[in-house]
Amino acid sequence: MRTNVRLIQKHRSFSEEFKRSLVAEFESGKFTVAQLGRLHKIKIQLIYNWIYKYSNTNQQGVIMVEKAQSSTQKMKDLEKRIAELERAVGQKQIKIEYLEKMIDIAKTDLNIDIKKNFNTPPSAGSERTKSN
């Protein structure tokens, strides 16, 4: 025999303090309605109802448009980030060129071969190598 199984829906009730704190988080700009819904596992329409009820600035019948950031501001931020990265790459390139020049000077003036190949034997000590 097959029994009828009914799912019992859980009914959650929220305190007025919780509702007001949720509306305050939305109005402060920390979270969007969708983010609050996902965070607290609450339907978006219920959050909107609370906003209309407890908010001083948002009223029912007024369209609320949520923008995280305008596209022009995003472009400016990305251009700024690109400029920072280009500057860092330029500084690293200058450092590489400086170190390569120091290696060349050490080889020509001091007869010290800093760039050793992997197959060369280790030096016998810290004495300067003599040129033949």
Image (cartoon, grey):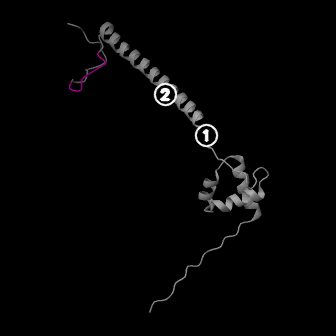
Numbered disc 2: secondary structure: helix
* Residue 84: % across, % down: 52, 26
User: Seen in the image, is 87 located left or right of residue 39?
Assistant: left
* Quadrant in which the N terminus is drawn: bottom left
Dots 1, 2 in contact, CB < 8 A: no
Residue 111 on image: x %, y %: 29, 10
Report the front residue among 69 and 129.
69
Q: Earlier in the sequence, mark 1 or mark 2?
A: 1
Q: At 63% from the left edge and 44% from the top edge, which residue is drawn?
A: 67
Q: Residue furthest bottom?
A: 1
Residue at position x 68%, y 46% in the image? 29
Q: Residue furthest right?
A: 56
Badge 1: how crowded within 10 Å, few (<14), some, or many (20+)?
few
Compared with 90, 132 (above or below) is above
Q: Determine whether the residue tagged by mark 1 lies in a helix, strand or loop.
A: loop
Q: Amino acid at mark 2?
A: Leu
- Residue position marked by numbered label 2 in the rendering: 85
- Closest to the observer: 25 or 88? 25
Q: Main secondary structure of the magenta part?
A: loop
Say if the magenta span includes residue 19.
no
What residue lies at 49% left-to-right and 89% top-to-bottom? 3
Q: Which stretch appears magenta? A: 113-119
Label 1 – label 2 distance at C-alpha: 22 Å
Number of on-image labels = 2
Residue 69, numbered circle = 1
Decide: few, some or many residues near mark 2? Use Cα within 10 Å; few <14, some 14-19, many ≥20.
few
**Residue type of the residue flagged with mark 1:** Gln
**Residue 95 appears left or right of 28:** left
Relative image position of residue 30 (x, y in whole percent)? 66, 47
